Image: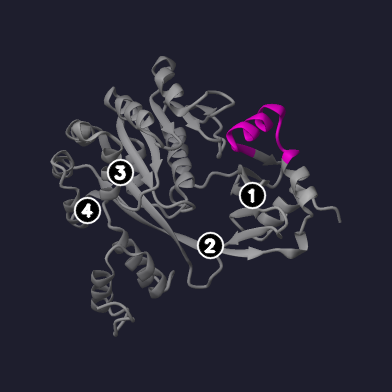
Amino acid sequence: MSITIDSLLKALVDKDASDLHLKAGQPPIMRVRGELVRVPEFALSPERHTEMLMGLLNDERKARLMEEKEVDLSYNLPGVSRFRVNMFWQRGHVGAVFRVIPFKIKTIEQLGMPAVCKRIAMMPRGLILVTGPTGSGKSTSLAAMIDHINSNKRAHVMTIEDPIEYVHQDKIAIVNQRELATDTHSFSDALRHVMRQNPDVILVGEMRDLETIQLAITAAETGHLVLSTLHTVDAAQTIDRIVDVFSPEQHAQIRTQLSVTIQAVVSQTLIPTMDGTSRVAAFEVMVATPSIRTLIRDGKTHQLYLDIQTGGDLGMQTLDGSLLKLVKEGRIDYEHALAKCSNPQDFHRRAVNAGIVEVAPSGVR
């Protein structure tokens, strides 16, 4: 059988894997339930590897790959899935990583997201951030929130993505999706013009530079609901990361702007399930209260954790609390939860009090 990119991607989906890594001269590698697995039966010659990847690019993208040394795009395999693709140069050869993007958008309930995320998605204005490490499912959670808006609110949603991942069909809302390089030159270019497009909701795929962050905050200040992502692990680090992008003399101003515009930070991570057949997400949720807004304005982000811990009535929860709940339910094992928690000592104490463990694991006191 001749190996094609389509046969590789079909095998990726059949194995329920999330990512495909292609490196010249090496067998393909798939990420299955978080673990990297080599698939030697799909080994390619370096020449066939290059031919196959370059065949996915039009002339414009080939020129960009040659000039900028990397390129992002999406690829659609009818009847199988969509894929987010990043191509890059590696030791003089083209490499690529494919991420599976299912056609069907899962709902907030199906993803196991906290119920408060429905209320957060329906807020009329402000800044909502979904954060977490690479591969933690941020895009999937954002898509679920946009789908909830699309199903329940007569709104104009503008998305700016690199590339477009989940494709939204209009329901109650109107959803326009713009892709970098194809429909606009940059996040900042698109955000500078978005006000003339009469949006109610703006999705910025990633707040990756100072100008994009500033424009997103300004859009939230002017009465729009802005959703975006950051590669941070919790609410406190998220606020600090945004502030630190700006020069020191601007920090007080940005803290004030954030204290007014921020509505919620949802942080997430993925953990293997107990039976090893899939992964489940644990979430931290911070909803902006007057107390939290004051802490952000005053630069006391280290105190946010306590407010989140005591904000259960408002739908808030800590990552450690979410992990402990998953352990109690028997969905993940204690060791995996301990590896992902924010405060191992406190997490262990709470696990002992809950009767989950009796003796401290090595390295934890």
- Write down the residue under mark 2: 34
Mark 1 or mark 4: name the one nearer the start of the chain: 1
The furthest residue to the top? 196
Which stretch did the figure color magenta? Answer: 54-74
CA–CA distance in space, label 1 to label 4 = 46 Å
Residue 337 in the image, given as x and y percentages of width and height: 38, 69
Mark 1 or mark 2: name the one nearer the start of the chain: 2
Residue 78 in the image, given as x and y percentages of width and height: 72, 41
Q: Which residue: 63% across, 54% down? A: 21
Q: Amino acid at mark 4?
A: Ile
Q: Which residue: 28% across, 34% down? A: 246
* 120 over 343 or under it: above or below: above
Q: Which mark is residue 91?
A: 1
Mark 4 or mark 2: name the one nearer the start of the chain: 2
Nearer mark to the viewer, of 4 and 2 = 2
- Write down the residue under mark 4: 308
Q: Which residue: 32% across, 40% down? A: 120
